Structures are given as structure tokens and as C-alpha cells.
Amino acid sequence: MACVHKFASNLNLERIDFKPTTLIVGTFNPGWDNLGNYAQWFYGRTNNNYFWDVLPRLHENSNLRLAPHKEWKAFCSRHKIALTDLIYSIDDADSDNQEHINHLKNYRDDAIARHFCQFTEVNLPAILVNHPSIAHVYLTRQLSGDFWQQKWLPVIRYCNETGKRVEPLLTPSGSARFQMTKGVDMTLRDFIFKHWQNSWHSL
């Protein structure tokens, strides 16, 4: 049985009630019940993710990391920000295969790239066509390795052709600490925030 995204019904922006101006794209959030995935919405595993700290600081100088997901959605509505991911489902994943379970429950992008081969991707260019108000498009990971670059390339091409801003961001997950050079005198949350601040559009 394929592993479908936990928030699959949100991936094509079917449920938003505003005209987005910014689109933030992640990778994949597995929806199997046997993974212990407690996320209530995108970037919702907040014990190891600073997304709901960093993004609200850019716009409101507030921290919503521990807020309920209804507040995350309200924030996005206020600031016309839509969220989606690159992958809709991992089609060769088997929920009865313990190795597959182990690969997915660590929520590591490199494990997805190494251990699976068949995917249904979110049609991001179609989303951008259907929502022409989007002017800024961000990917919440650095582009390293052919796997993720190939999945992001159609977005780069479309944005370059249509004059939209397209940027990769430092991952908001705890693994961003591996990007910190020795002797950096700031917290991880501030380190991620500074990187995002340098890449974000003018507010």
C-alpha cells in the first residue's frame, strides 16, 4: 500500500480561502498511522522543527511554535502564505514492510531518496498556473543531490519564465545545526532565522 501524504487534501491548495502571494514547499509528510506522526499540519513535528518559530518572526516578530495548528492556519491566511510539498505519495512503499516503516518514521529526506523509487509528485507548475497571485516560491531545503534537484527543476523553470521569485531556504529542522560553523555564537533558531531573513522577499 502506497504511503500517501498526511495532508494530501491540502497539497493542491483546495482548502485555502484567500489569494496566496507566497508558496512554501516542503518535501513529504508520511501519513501512515504506524509511524507515530503527531503533526497536526505542515511542519507540525515541532520537537525538531523551527518553521513555526522562524516564519512568524519574519512577518510578526512572534513565535507560534507551540501554538495550536488553528493559529498556524490563521497566520498563513493573514499573510497570504500557502503551504504544500513536493511529493503526494510514495507508491512503492509497503506499510507491512518493517524496513519501509523504519525508513519513513525517521522523516529523513535522504532516506526517501535512497530507498524508494516510485512517486506521485505534486504538480507545482499547475498550482502556480491556477494561483497566479503567487509571486514568491520557496523550498524549505537546500538543493543537494540529483533526486530533489530534479523534482524542483520544473518549478525553477516555470518561475524563471513567468518572473516569479524562487529560492531554496535552509531547512527549518534540527538538522540545520550541521550547517553551523564551529564557534557560531547564536542559537539554532536564530541561525535559521538569519538565513531565512537573508533569502526572504521584502516585507
Image (spheres, rainbow, N blue to C red):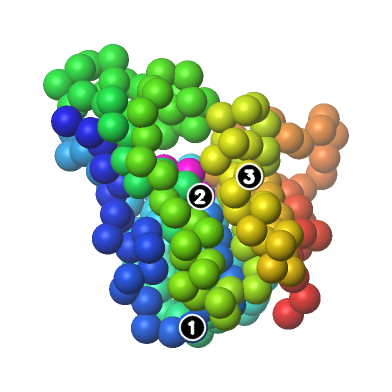
**Which circle marks residue 153 in the picture?**
3
Residue placed most toward the observer, 67 or 150: 150
Q: Residues within 10 Å of mark 2 (few under 14, many from 20)?
A: some
- Secondary structure beneath label 2: strand
Image quadrant where one finds the N terminus: top left
Q: Residues within 10 Å of mark 3 (few under 14, many from 20)?
A: few
Three-letter amino acid code at disc 1?
Answer: Lys
Q: Which residue is mark 1?
A: 19
Query: From what the image shows, is residue 26 above or below residue 94?
Result: below
Query: From what the image shows, is residue 9 above or below residue 58?
Result: above
Is residue 96 one of those drawn in magenta?
no
- Secondary structure beneath label 3: helix
Magenta span main SS: loop
Q: Is residue 41 left or right of residue 76?
A: left
Three-letter amino acid code at disc 3?
Answer: Leu
Tell me the magenta residue range. 26-30
- State the CA–CA distance, disc 3 to disc 1: 25 Å
Q: Residues within 10 Å of mark 1 (few under 14, many from 20)?
A: some
Q: Is residue 115 visible?
A: yes
Q: Is residue 57 visible?
A: no
Of mark 2 and mark 1, the one earlier in the sequence is 1
Q: Which residue is mark 2?
A: 26
Three-letter amino acid code at disc 2?
Answer: Gly
Of mark 2 and mark 3, the one earlier in the sequence is 2
Q: Is residue 166 left or right of residue 49?
A: right
Query: From what the image shows, is residue 76 above or below residue 121?
Result: below
Single out the mark in the foreground, 2 or 1: 1
Of mark 3 and mark 1, the one earlier in the sequence is 1
Residue 129 percent coordinates (x, y): 52, 69
